Amino acid sequence: MASIKFLIQGKNSPANIYVQLSVGRGKVFKRKTGYSIDPKDWGKKGMPIDRNTSLKNLKADLNKLSSNLENCLNDAVSLKEVVNGDWLQLQINIINGQVIGDEKEKLTNHIQYIIDNAHRVKKANNQIGLSQSRIKSYKLFKNVISRFEKEINKGQSFFIRDVGFDFGEQFSEWLFSKKYSINYVGKNIDNLKAVCRDAERRGIETSTQLKRISSFTKQTNSDEVIILSESEQESIADLKLNREALINARKWLLLGCQLGQRFSDLIRITPDMIKASNGIKIIELTQIKTSKLVAIPLMPKAIEIIENGMPYPIALQNFNEYIKDICREAGFNQPTKGSAYIETEEKSKNKPKTPGIYPKWKLIGSHVCRRSFASNLYGKIPTALLINITGHGTEKMFLKYIGRTAYDNAYQMMEYFGKLQAKEKKEAQMQVLKNAN
C-alpha cells in the first residue's frame, strides 16, 4: 500500500522539508518539496507545530501537496505509468507551478496544472474557482489524453503547440472508434480547447490552427429525453417499498420532479429555506453552478412531501442507484433509447456510457428530476419562468435540454395567437349582441 509522509534532515535552520513516497517494497522515493522550516517548529508527527499563522499555513500547504500527490499517484497507477523519483519530482513541480522548459508545455502537465490550481482559476463569468464536477471532468480528460498518447503516440507526450486542426480530427476519430457517444466526444473536444486557451493566456505557445477545431453536440430529440411523466410519478408514489433507503430516495426523486433543481442544489434544501410570500410557500436558494438566487413556488405535491418529513441527505452515487431500483420495481421496462454503463470484464471507473436501447429504469439518473419538471411544465407555464427556476443560461440551452427546438416555440406561439383571436372574436360577438339589445 502506498504511503506519503514528510520529513526534515539536519538541525540547521532553515531545514528543507522532503516528501517520501513509498509504493511498495524497495520502492521508496524522496524529493524536496520546495518548503523549509526551523527544526524546532517541526513536530514528531511529521508536520509543522501549528503555533502561529505562518506554521498553520505551511501545514495546510503540505496537506494540500499530499492530497494532490495522492490523486496523481492514483491516476498514474490506473494508467500504468512508471512511478519513480523523477516522476515524483515532476508532480511536485507541476503542483507548485514550477514546471520549466518543455515539461511546462506538455498537454497532460497543463491539465494537471489546472486541476492543482482549480481554486484560483478564473471562469468565463469572472468568478474564481472551479466546481468539483468541473475538476472531475478535467481529471477524466487527463486520463483520456494519456490513453490517446499511449495508443497513438507510442506513449510520448503531446505538447500544447501540437493541438491544431489535424490533432483535433485524429483525436475525434480515435474517440469515435471507441464507440463513444457524440456528446462524450464533443465534451472532450471542448475540454481540449479550454486547456489550450488557458495555456495561451499563460504565455505558452499554441497552434495557429487551434481555432479551427470545431465543437459539436448531438441535437437531442424529444423522444430521447428521459423524463418521468406525471402518471409515472404517481405510480412511484403509490409503490410499496420496504427498504428505508429506497423510501428516502423516493422522497428526493418526487420532490426533485416538483422543484426542478440540479441534484447539488436539491440535496441542500432544508425546512428553513421555506418562506411565505403573499400566502404562497416558496423555497429560496442560491444555485451552486450559477450563483443565482431563485425562488421556487411550492406546488401541492411538494408541500405534501415536505410536511410528511424532509428526506435525509444522500450521496449522488447512492441516489442514482436507488432510483433505478425504484423505477425497476415500478415496472418501467419499456424499451427506451439512451446511454447506459455496460458491465464488461474490463474494469474502468472512468468508462463512459454506451448508447443503445435499454429498459427505461436503467436510464434513470439524477437528471430526471430537473428534466421532468421542465418537460412536464413546458407549454403550461411561460418558458421564461421555467428558465428562471431551472437555472439555464439561455432559452436555446433550455430547449435543447428538454429536446425541443425553436419550431416548438413557434407552434406554441401560434396556439396562443389562436386562443387570443378566438377570445377577441367572442368579445366582438358579445359586443354586437349588447348593441342589438
Image: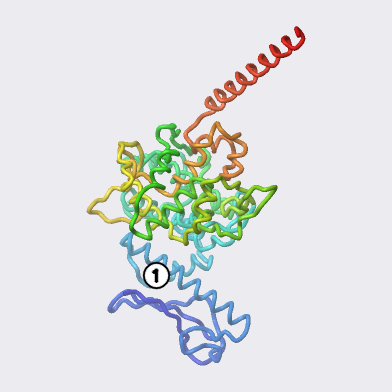
> Quick one: which residue is furthest to the left in this view?
345
Q: Is residue 98 visible?
A: yes
| Residue for badge 1 | 86
Q: Nearer the viewer, residue 385 or 208?
A: 385
Residue 108's spot in the image, x, y percent?
44, 56
Callout 1 secondary element: helix
Q: Is residue 146 left or right of residue 256?
A: left
> Quick one: which residue is furthest to the top in this view?
436
Which of the image's four quarters has the N terminus? bottom left
Q: Can you say whether 39 is above or below 262 in the image?
A: below
Q: Is residue 48 left or right of residue 250?
A: right
> Quick one: which residue is furthest to the front in this view?
437
Residue type, mark 1 in image: Asp
Q: How many marks?
A: 1
Figure colour scheme = rainbow
Residue 167's spot in the image, x, y percent?
42, 43
In which image quadrant can residue 226 be found? top left
